[in-house]
Image (cartoon, coloured by chain):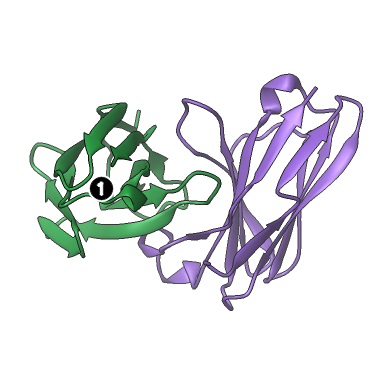
Chain colours: A green, B purple
Amino acid sequence: KNQVEQSPQSLIILEGKNCTLQCNYTVSPFSNLRWYKQDTGRGPVSLTIMTFSENTKSNGRYTATLDADTKQSSLHITASQLSDSASYICVVSVGGSYIPTFGRGTSLIVHP
Amino acid sequence: ETGVTQTPRHLVMGMTNKKSLKCEQHLGHNAMYWYKQSAKKPLELMFVYNFKEQTENNSVPSRFSPECPNSSHLFLHLHTLQPEDSALYLCASSQNPTAGADQETQYFGPGTRLLVL
């Protein structure tokens, strides 16, 4: 069964600090992995997408990594801001399928 | 804003009511999706429409009935729902699913928060 596990479930950090969110997956055949940011009351917004051959992708202060051998991904947020408070969702797509596999998300709260 | 709008944003209904959720995308996309997001659970894909044709029904109960009159509009008709159907219902769209459904980036609307009493 395809699964995506994210950790931690929730995280509280101080403004300006860095943090790293984790995603482990068992999805086959693997096509790509996306990180989404979902603000409260909003729909998810795509941050990064990585295919099998890519091991890092950046989007401003967000950097995602992918280790296809261990089936792990991480999302690193640098110099956090209050606006980074959101849920971060890891999504893995199966080759040729419309139905991606979603993680439960990590809820991040950034305090001033 | 992502160019995908949903109405209403909030809805409270009884189990015997009939209501409809509406989604409209202004991005010129050809595929539209309905998702269910329950508390503490991953997003669940419900339906996929490509060029107005339904291509996926992810084992959704018949009390949810989708309708896609054109590539820009998507409806979800609700009838005789259960309290466990209370959730955030998200609509999304993507450009060209025939190019490879798994390659497409989906653009989500803000969702409709549904409460079934």
| Dot 1: chain letter | A
Mark 1 highlights which residue?
Answer: A30
State which quarter of the image contains the C terminus of chain B: top right
Give the class, few, some or many, for how many residues have Cα within 10 Å of label 1's Cα (few <14, many ≥20). Answer: some
Residue at left 17%, top 62%? A58
Q: Quadrant of residue B103?
A: bottom left
x%, y% of residue B33? 59, 54
* Residue B100 spot, x, y in % from top left: 40, 65
Residue drawn where x is 62% and y is 49% of the image? B111
Q: Report the residue that reaches farthest toward the front.
A: A112
Q: Looking at the picture, how far across and down is residue B88, in whole percent?
A: 61, 39
| Residue A80 to residue B96: above or below | above
Q: Residue at x 91, y 26 (%)?
A: B16
- SS class of the residue under badge 1? strand
- So how many labels did they put on this image? 1
Please say if B9 is above or below B36: below
For residue A28, side relative to residue B50 (left or right): left
| Residue A17 appears in the rendering | yes
Asked if one can make out residue A6 in the rendered structure from this viewpoint, the answer is no
* Residue B27 position (above or below residue B47): below
The residue closer to the viewer here, A84 or B17, is A84
Q: Nearer the viewer, residue A58 or A19?
A: A19
Residue A60 percent location from the top left of the image? 21, 65
